[in-house]
Image (spheres, rainbow, N blue to C red):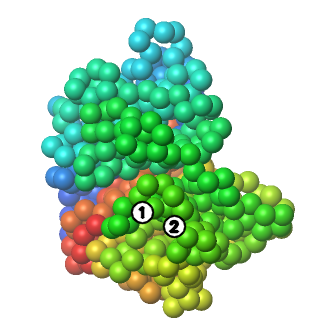
Amino acid sequence: MKAACLFTAALFATAAVHAADGDPDPGFAFGGIATRAVTTPLYQLYEPGAALGDDGSIVTAGVAGVSAYSTATRFAVARFLPDGGVDTTFGSVGVSEIDFSNGAADYPAYARSVARLDGGQWLVAGRVGPSFDVGLARLLPNGQLDGAYGNQGRAQVDVGGQDILLDLQVDAQQRAWLLVDSNSDVLMRFTAQGQLDASFGVGGKLVLPNDLVPLGFTRDAQDRILLGGIQFGTTRYRMAVRRLRADGSTDTSFGNQGLSLLEPDLRANAQQLRVLADGRILVVGNSHHATNWQGSSQGRLTVARLLPDGQLDTGYGASGFRVVDFGGDERGIAYPDTRIALGADGKLTLARAVIEPVVAIRLARLLPSGQPDATFAPEGKRTVLQNGYNGLTLSNVLLSPQRLLIAGTYNQGNQRVFYATAWRDGDRIFRDGLD
């Protein structure tokens, strides 16, 4: 399999040697799309994950079939160089495949998230095994398994049901935090050596309160845990944010006895959280106003901001909320499906892959006030990669010096293609400051 640089007229007709800021970056994949293909599996259970290396390289984690359209699958991790070239020194010609089967037939493994570690290493996590446990693997800078981690480079945990990994984060101590949807929602913590951290929760697992369905989490400067998700009601579904102390107990000083409920519309959810330097909290998800159930991934990009005590910050956007409407409720390709990147200047970039009414990537950028950033695009909104790719997914939106990047996968014949593409930001058209 060879790396390819594809040029798409719909997106790159304006790319030129002297491209302006906001145009496709001619210094990345010659102004096109960097790609690397793997054998496609029968199922694509997750949108893949992506992360940025210290040097500006892009790593995307997804899935590869052992053979075309097989149920036997492996974690697949592709790495692109800062200029968009495939890193042929990583794994096998740019792709590392991680096998959890230990020789078992038709053994599935689907990577969901990837996180950068110190020293150029990478942590990859997802669902593994026929009963769908949680799997972790640590890769060396060259894409090979790090045998010093877990059990010969891998760790595997059965949380107690059909486990769905929702979020992966790594802290300053290189410990992995994993939010898992199972019979009970659980936050797990692993040591830097790949073992469940017995000092956290019960044997490394913290069972979460059941008054919200968590979709994402973050931690603040005081090591408090913030959970974002949904609280289901009879007629209204609310954005929900709960704050826990570092020991896992509820922080009753936050919101209403530890819980903040937000109602930007009849039905809403919170998928991503970011804590700002002043302690205020950005809450990002989607919302819609249909009275009947439209599906979890239906809605419009929606942002709220909370004060440090969990109360709605009504000075943000329009009375505390900003709804980014591309023409009505849209259906995402996965759930949760919202990706964000926060610049040091406070500008927030939002991204989402949609399949209805069009197949495309939606991008938006908001000013710190919650108002649309007109320097990014009219009304702060852009649509890219529209109707050109089958099975288009979005891994992440990333900020690097002078560039805004997106990465993901799409289908091409019997192959699953990892892609990355970039736009110029030399004069800070897209943002000021670094992530």
* Residue 142 point in image, percent of width and height: 18, 32
Q: Is residue 183 above or below residue 330?
A: above
Q: Amino acid at mark 2?
A: Asp
Q: Nearer the viewer, residue 7 or 123?
A: 123
Say which residue appears at 21% left-offset and 65% top-offset: 401
Labels 1 & 2 near each other (Cβ < 8 A): yes
Say which residue appears at 35% left-offset and 67% top-offset: 222
* Residue 418 point in image, percent of width and height: 39, 40
Q: Is residue 224 above or below residue 143?
A: below
* Residue 284 point in image, percent of width and height: 53, 68
Mark sitting earlier along the chain (1/2): 1
Instruction: Identify the image quadrant of the N terminus.
Output: top left
* Residue 293 point in image, percent of width and height: 80, 58
Q: Nearer the viewer, mark 1 or mark 2?
A: 2
Res. 194 image quadrant: top left
Whether residue 34 is visible, yes or no, is no
- Is 399 on the left-hand or right-hand side of 196? left
Q: Is residue 162 above or below residue 70?
A: below
Most extreme residue toward the bottom is 315
Whether residue 250 is visible, yes or no, is yes
Residue at which label 1 appears: 224
SS for dot 2: loop
- Is 181 on the left-hand or right-hand side of 342? right
Structural crowding at the residue carrying mark 2, measured as other residues with C-alpha within 10 Å and reported as few (<14), some (14–19) or many (≥20):
some
Instruction: Identify the image quadrant of the C terminus.
Output: bottom left
SS for dot 1: loop
CA gap between label 1 and label 2 equals 8 Å
Q: Which mark is residue 251?
A: 2
- Is 25 on the left-hand or right-hand side of 41? left
Say which residue appears at 27% left-offset and 33% top-offset: 193
